[in-house]
Image (cartoon, helix red, strand yellow):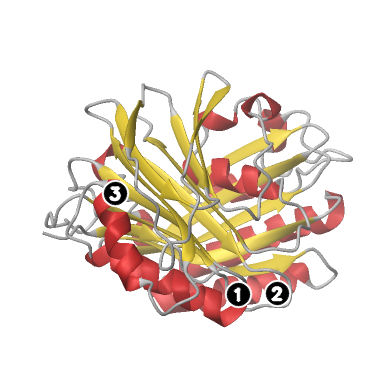
């Protein structure tokens, strides 16, 4: 019995800071709002909020970008944007989230209006390093409950000059539960995959997409069995580095198996524990798989990312981050990739807020 996809990497429009950013972000937000059928009022709210976020970056940030995409939960859909920058951070977050408030040298103008307009809002900032703002806009404000009690969020970004990314991720249930409209009925472990297709461009993306489809269709629930299925599916492609983790909140554990250079890290109490993958290439050379289990206590966060992002980041460099939403966790870590010329993908999973 195959599982049901809860979330997966999808098309993301990455817009870098330049003089035309607010207008470009507004156009993309309007396009996505129309695509998912947001009504006139909600569509206007998306456009206004993303224009405010883009203007903040343009006026105050050292460098940054706005990422826009559609996110789905069951039969519901939303427009989401994530605005990130590389400095200077916000000195007083509570103050600048008041409508109309601003602060010289920091993001602030318009944050209050984004909070008011968005159905879901989150923010994290590090003084001198940068800020991430997340906003989601759901039809009729119907925000779904997180499936299986898991808050998960991932982002991918292609290497400069490419339109497609060779990195991808997906999250599925262990079985084929029937979803409700909001997608919140999934029970049991949640299985996550992070994939780095070898190289860049269309052939790397082909390998990644093949892996994602095989992950969806695999009848196995254990990471090693899933990797075996992905290995067979990827023959004839460039191959990939892949990590698979099954998070079971009820049992407070994560089962893990990985091949290649995908980094997998458990974060708890501002300490990190790496879950090590075996050398090899899924689709070409699959080593003897060695799955193992690690504790996943309350408050723990699982982070998986490809080698487009340095593995040298430390949790203590992001005070307060791991209490934020999973997408914000992923975006702040992704921001550390800076201008590195490589595909990059990051995925974070944690228990949803009660």
Image coordinates for residue 163, horizontal then vertical, percent: 63, 79
Q: Which residue is mark 2?
A: 24
SS state under label 2: helix
Q: Position of residue 249 (x, y in %)?
A: 27, 31
Mark in front: 1 vs 3: 3
Cα distance in 3D space between marks 2 and 3: 44 Å
Residues at badges 2 and 1 in contact (C-beta under 8 Å)? yes
Residue identified by numbered label 1? 28
Q: Which mark is residue 224?
A: 3
**Mark 2 or mark 3: which is in front?**
3
Q: Earlier in the sequence, mark 1 or mark 3?
A: 1
**Mark closer to the chain start, 2 or 3:** 2
Task: Measuring from the top left, give residue 313's x and y in whole percent.
Answer: 67, 35
- On the rendered structure, is 235 left or right of 325? left
Mark 3: secondary structure: helix
Q: Quadrant of residue 312?
A: top right
CB under 8 Å between discs 2 and 3: no
- Residue at coordinates 52% horizontally, 34% vertically from top-left? 324
Identify the residue at image location x=20%, y=59%: 181
Quarter of the picture containing the C terminus is top left
Quick check: 186 left or right of 165?
A: left
Foreground residue among 286 and 134 = 286
Tell me: 62 left or right of 23. Answer: right
Q: Give SS at disc 1.
A: helix
Quadrant in the picture for residue 59 = bottom right
Q: How many marks?
A: 3
Q: Where residue 303 appears, x then y in whole percent?
A: 50, 40
Q: Is residue 138 above or below residue 92?
A: below
Q: Residues within 10 Å of mark 2 (few under 14, many from 20)?
A: some
Rendered position, 144 above or below 125 = below
């Amino acid at each position: 019995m195959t599982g049901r996809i809860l979330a997966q990497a999808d098309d993301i429009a990455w817009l870098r800071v330049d003089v035309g950013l607010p207008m470009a972000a507004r156009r993309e937000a309007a396009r996505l709002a129309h695509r998912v059928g947001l009504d006139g009022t909600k569509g206007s709210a998306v456009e206004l909020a993303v224009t405010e976020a883009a203007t903040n970056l343009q006026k105050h940030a050292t460098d940054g970008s706005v990422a826009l995409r559609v996110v789905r939960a069951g039969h519901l859909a939303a427009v989401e944007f994530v605005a990130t920058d590389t400095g200077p951070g916000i000195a007083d977050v509570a103050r600048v989230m008041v409508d109309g408030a601003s602060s010289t040298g920091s993001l602030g103008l318009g944050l209050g209006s984004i909070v008011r307009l968005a159905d879901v809002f989150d923010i994290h900032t590090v003084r001198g390093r940068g800020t991430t703002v997340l906003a989601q806009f759901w039809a009729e404000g119907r925000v779904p409950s997180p499936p299986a009690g898991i808050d998960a969020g991932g982002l991918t970004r292609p290497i400069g000059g490419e339109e497609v990314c060779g990195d991808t991720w997906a999250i599925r249930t262990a079985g084929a539960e029937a979803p409700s409209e909001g997608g919140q009925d999934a029970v049991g472990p949640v299985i996550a995959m992070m994939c780095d297709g070898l190289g860049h461009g269309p052939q790397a993306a082909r390998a990644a997409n093949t892996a994602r489809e095989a992950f969806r269709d695999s009848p196995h629930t254990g990471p090693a069995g899933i990797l075996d299925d992905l290995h067979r599916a990827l023959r004839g492609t460039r191959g990939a580095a892949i990590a698979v983790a099954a998070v079971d909140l009820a049992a407070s554990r994560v089962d893990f198996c990985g091949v290649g250079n995908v980094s997998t890290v458990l974060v708890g109490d501002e300490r990190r524990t790496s879950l090590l993958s075996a050398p090899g290439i899924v689709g070409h050379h699959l080593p003897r798989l060695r799955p193992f289990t690690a504790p996943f206590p309350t408050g723990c966060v699982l982070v998986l990312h490809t080698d487009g992002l340095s593995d040298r980041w430390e949790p203590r460099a992001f005070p307060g981050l791991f209490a934020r939403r999973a997408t914000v966790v992923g975006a702040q870590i992704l921001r550390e990739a800076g201008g590195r010329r490589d595909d990059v993908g990051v995925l974070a999973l944690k228990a949803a807020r009660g």
